[in-house]
Amino acid sequence: MTPPLIEARQISKRFGALTALNAVDLTIRSGEVLALLGDNGAGKSTFIKVLSGAHPASDGEILVDGRPVHFASPQDAAEAGIATIFQELALSENLSIAENVFLGREMTRNVLGVPFLKRRAMKRQVTGLLDELDAHISDPEAPVGSLSGGQRQAVAICRALNLDARLVIMDEPTAALAVAETRKVLQLVRRLADSGRAVILISHNMHDVFEVADRIAVFRRGRKIAERERRATDPEEIVSFITGAHPDVRALEMQS
Amino acid sequence: MSSRTSLTLPILAGLWILIVAGLAILQPSAMALSTVTTVLQFSTLLALVSLGQAMVILGGGAGIDLSVGGTVSLVAIIAMLLDTAGVPSFLLPVVCLVAGTLLGLVNGILVTRLRLLPLIATLGTFYVYSGTALAITGGSAIGGAPAYLLPWGRGTLAGFPLPFVTLVLPLFVLAVLLLRYTAWGRWIYAFGFNERSARLVGIPVDRARFIAYGFSGLMAGLAALVSLAWLGSARPNIGQNLELTSLTAVMLGGVAIFGGRGGLVGVLAAVLLLVTLQTGLLQLNVNTIWQVGIIGALLILVLLVDNIRMIRRTA
Ligand SMILES: Nc1ncnc2c1ncn2[C@@H]1O[C@H](COP(=O)(O)OP(=O)(O)O)[C@@H](O)[C@H]1O
Ligand SMILES: [Mg+2]
C-alpha cells in the first residue's frame, strides 16, 4: 500500500509552560478534505503552523510520502508541496492579483543579474488558474485591495495551486464571508480535493464542515480527541466532542 | 497604483505653476534660463538624497533615514581629508561612494540586526555623523577639491547642470525601472506594505532593508561628491537640513510614510517644486527662516488634503 501523503506522529508544541499541542497523530490522504474542529485555543492553528513550517514542533515527526521531513520555514513546506492559506490572509493589498499569486517566486528573465518580470506570462498563467477555479475574476491586474473576501480567498487558493501544492491548508477561510461567498469558497475546496489534492480545512461552522469534509478531527486543549468519517457521524456527536460533553472526552480528561 | 499617486503629479504641477506665476509677477527678472540652471543645480543634492530616502521609506517597517544630511557632510569631509593626506585624487569619487555606503550600512545594521527603531537609530547616527564632520574641521571648509572634478560639477548642457543630467536623471530612470519591472521592485512594495505576508512567502525582508539603508548612504555619498565638484571644497555643514527637505520631498511626492505606496516620479517632481519654491523665495529676499517655515506649511497642507481624501474614500 502506498503511504499516506502526510503523516503527523506524536506532534507536541509548547510555548514556554503552555502546551498548545499534546502528542497529536493525524494522517492526511490525497483527494480528501479533512476538517479540523475545536474550541478557540484548542490548538488547530498551532497544528497547521507546525505542518506548514511556520513553527517548529517541540516533539514528534512529520512524514511526507512515508519519509520523515524537517521544515525550517514555510518555503521548505512549500517545496514539499504543502501550501498554507493562513487565517490572516497573507496577501499584499497594494499589489495586483497576479503579483500576489507569484509573490516571492516571480517568473523572471535575468538581465545582467537583475530579475525582470515576465508580466505577460504571469498574467496568462493567473488567468488560466482563475478560470480553472471558476472564480469570476476577470482582471488579474486588479489590486487585491479592491476584492471581496471571497475573491481574496480565491486569490490565495490560486497561489497555492500555482505552487503545485499537493496539500492545501486553509485556516477559517469562510470566517469573514457572506453566505453566497462562503458557498463559492466551499466549492473551491471541493474542487481542490476532486482534483486529487489533499485539503485541511479549519472551520467553526458545523454546516460548512458537514457540507464539504470527508473526515473530521476534533481538537480539545491541545489533543486530538476524536476522528470520524463524515458519513459515520453527525453534528450532535461532533459538538459533544468539542464541548467535552461526550462520555469519551470525559473519560479521557479524567485520566489526565 | 493608489489614487494618491495618480493625483500627486497634477497637484505638484499645479503648485509649481502657481509658484512660477507668482514669481513672474513679483520678480520678472527671475524668469531666465540661468534661474532654471540654478534650480536644477540645487536640486541635484536634494534629488539624490531623496531617492535614497524614498527607497528606505517605501520599504516600510517604520523605515526612515534621518542621517542623510550628516552623511553628506561627513563623506565630503572624509574624502577631502584623505585627498589632502595624499590618497590619489582620481580615487576621490570611489572614496565618496564607499564611505557613503558604509555609513548607510551602519544604519542598516542598527535597524535590521540590532532592531532599533529607524527613527531613533538614524537620529543617533545623524548626530554622530554631523557632529564628527564639525568636530574634525572645527566648522571650517576644506578647500582644494581636485581640479578635474570642477568642469563636471559646474558644467551645463543646454542649461542643464551636468551632475543633474549624468547622475540624477539616469539614477531616477534606473530606480523607476527597478521598482516597476523587476521582482525586487515588487518585493519592496510587498514588504513595505505587509511585512508579515512578505516574510511568509520567503522574501528576505531584513537583507533588502539592510541594502536600502546602504543605498541611501550611497546616494548621500554621491551628493557629497557633487557638492565637492560644484563648490570646490568640503563644507562640514553642506548636508544641513537635507534630512528634513528630503523627507518633505518624499512625502510631497506621494510616498506613504508607512511604506509600500507611491513612486519615484512624484518624488523627483516634489524635489523640483521644493527647490523652485526655495529659489523663488530667495529671489524675493525672503529670509531662510521663513523659507523653512513655508516649506513646513506646504507639507502639512498636502498631508491634510491627502487625509481628507482618505477619509472621504473610506467613509
Ligand atoms: N505564538 C504563540 N505563543 C504563545 N502561545 C501561543 C502562540 N500561538 C498559540 N498560542 C496558544 O496556544 C493555544 C492554541 O492556540 P491556537 O492553535 O491558535 O488555537 P485555535 O486555532 O484552535 O483557536 C492557545 O492557548 C494560544 O493562546
Ligand atoms: Mg485559530
Image (cartoon, rainbow, N blue to C red):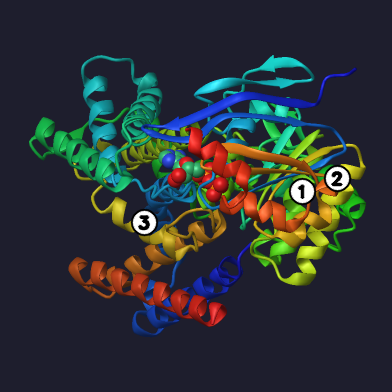
Dot 3 and dot 1 within a common chain: no
Dot 2 corresponds to which residue?
Answer: A192
Residue type, mark 1 in image: Ile
Numbered circles on residues, count: 3
Q: Splitting the image into 4 quarters, where does residue A61 fall?
A: top right
Q: CA distance from mark 2 to mark 3?
A: 48 Å
For label 1, the residue is A157
Kindly indicate whether the residue at mark 1 contacts the one at mark 2 (C-beta within 8 angstroms). Answer: yes
State the SS at label 3: helix
Q: Residue at x 90, y 37 (%)?
A: A196
Which image quarter: residue A252?
top right
Image spot of residue A174 (x, y percent) = 70, 60
Read off the chain for label 1: A
Q: Which residue is mark 3?
A: B247
Relative image position of residue A201 (x, y in whole percent): 72, 47
Q: Is residue B99 left or right of residue B211?
A: left
Depth check: B116 or B141 in front?
Answer: B116
What amino acid type should be assigned to the residue bearing mark 3? Leu
Q: B157 or A216: which is nearer to us?
A: A216
**Image quadrant occupied by the C terminus of chain B:** bottom right
Q: Chain of mark 2?
A: A
Percent across and percent down for residue A168 are 75, 40
Task: Please report, as a chain letter, where disc 3 is located.
Answer: B
Q: Residues within 10 Å of mark 3 (few under 14, many from 20)?
A: many
Residue A62 visible (yes or no)? yes
Q: Earlier in the sequence, mark 2 or mark 1?
A: 1
Q: Nearer the viewer, mark 2 or mark 3?
A: 2
